[in-house]
Amino acid sequence: MKENRLIQGFVALLFFAMFIYGMSCQMIGTLITRIILHYDIRMAQAGLMSSFINIGNFAAIFLISVLSGRINKLILLGASLFFFSASLFLISTAPSFGILLACFALVGVFGATLNMIITSLVADLQPDKISQRVSLVHGFFGLGGLCGPIVFERLVVNLNWAQAHFIVSMIFVVYLIIYAVFVRWQWSPLMIRMPHEKQSRFGFSDIVQFFLLKRHLLMWIIVFFYGGGQSTLAIWIKRYVETHLNEPAWGAYALSAMWLGIAVSRLIISPGIKAPSLRKIFIGNLISAAALTAGLFSGSVQGIAAASLAVGLSSGLTVPLILSLGCEWHPDKTTFGTLMPFTAFYVSYVVFPPFSGLISDLLGLPWGVALGILCAILTSVFSGMLDLCMKTERVK
């Protein structure tokens, strides 16, 4: 009983890490207008900040491939927290734009590492409740996403965008100290619940083999298009409200509305609906496409805010449900099961922000945001294909 309470306490600590990480991920979307003005750049160039973060995310895949099973996950998470906070500190110095992009790449490397390791640890420590726990931990990420835009918008009333990055870096330093003390104190009970490290190893050959199985490839495509839609809204919806609708005061709230929906979707809606995961994803993303279409046609702040909320509520469950499937398909290699879907997510975050920014520069901001509609439709289509694929495999 005491051991279970300790494990639950540690899982709660991981949930809090995802909350503050979720907050930090909203800094670009919230502060992008101020950064554009500071560096005097165009929207397509501003989209590169998100792309460099996700180039770093993609680099983290190779880092984890090398280190998984060779360095203990608890130590790897602590190192990731340290270097993530250090990267945010470098950004807070407001270096030249080229160096800034390199710093964002480092944020991507260590942010992706802590994201994947936290998800894997939750699956390892509570294997009988993988779907529920993974949804919850990413629900806390959504709660952080909800709070982030509002918190940062308030911060920059008295501080600039660089100082906001410094404050977040210090928050991660404090968390790291708490984490290190807890792990040092409860090392033995935690290690009993962890899988044997040699069994959890994987290499580049495993990554190649992943794409040779049809269901894996379809899973990857689903996450790619979902990430494309989410990244488009997360980066540009605030600017759409501020500049296209000319309502600066409502920008942060429109972005927060999406993350409120995502948090509720993961914490309440997904666990509460008793239906197959892929069916939830299929229907949810169709609703998301319809809601965003209606929001853009409304031409109003209230309409786009309501659409953002509906997008989060209907499709926010996509990532944790896919990650749960990955862990269930690879129970002895949960890091691998979370890493492969995340590769698609990170690639989409590299591709779509500058692409949607370019569309916005050429055709107007509404067309850039509308790219999210196409992504939601394609997410739904491929989730339906994966559902059929898995039914066919069960029949065989």
Image (cartoon, rainbow, N blue to C red):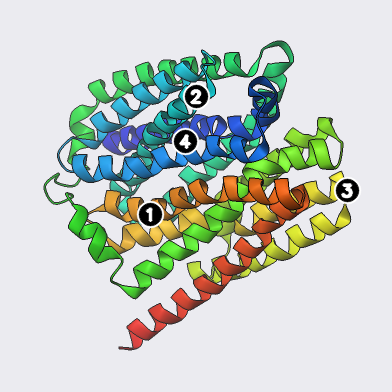
Q: Earlier in the sequence, mark 1 or mark 3?
A: 1
| Quarter of the figure with residue 41 | top right
What's the CA distance linking mark 2 and mark 3?
34 Å
**Label 2: which secondary element:** helix
Which comes before the other along the chain, label 2 or label 1? 2
Does the CB distance between marks 4 and 2 fall below 8 Å?
no
Eye-nearest disc, 4 or 1: 4
Q: Earlier in the sequence, mark 4 or mark 2?
A: 4
The residue identified by callout 3 is: 300
Q: Quadrant location of the N terminus?
A: top left
Estimate the spatial distance between the alpha carbons at disc 4 and disc 2, rounded to whole Å. 24 Å
Estimate the spatial distance between the alpha carbons at disc 4 and disc 1, rounded to whole Å: 16 Å
Q: Amino acid at mark 3?
A: Ser
Q: From the viewer's perspective, is the residue at label 4 or at label 2 nearer? A: 2
Q: Label 4 near label 3: C-beta < 8 Å?
A: no
Q: Quadrant of the C terminus?
A: bottom left
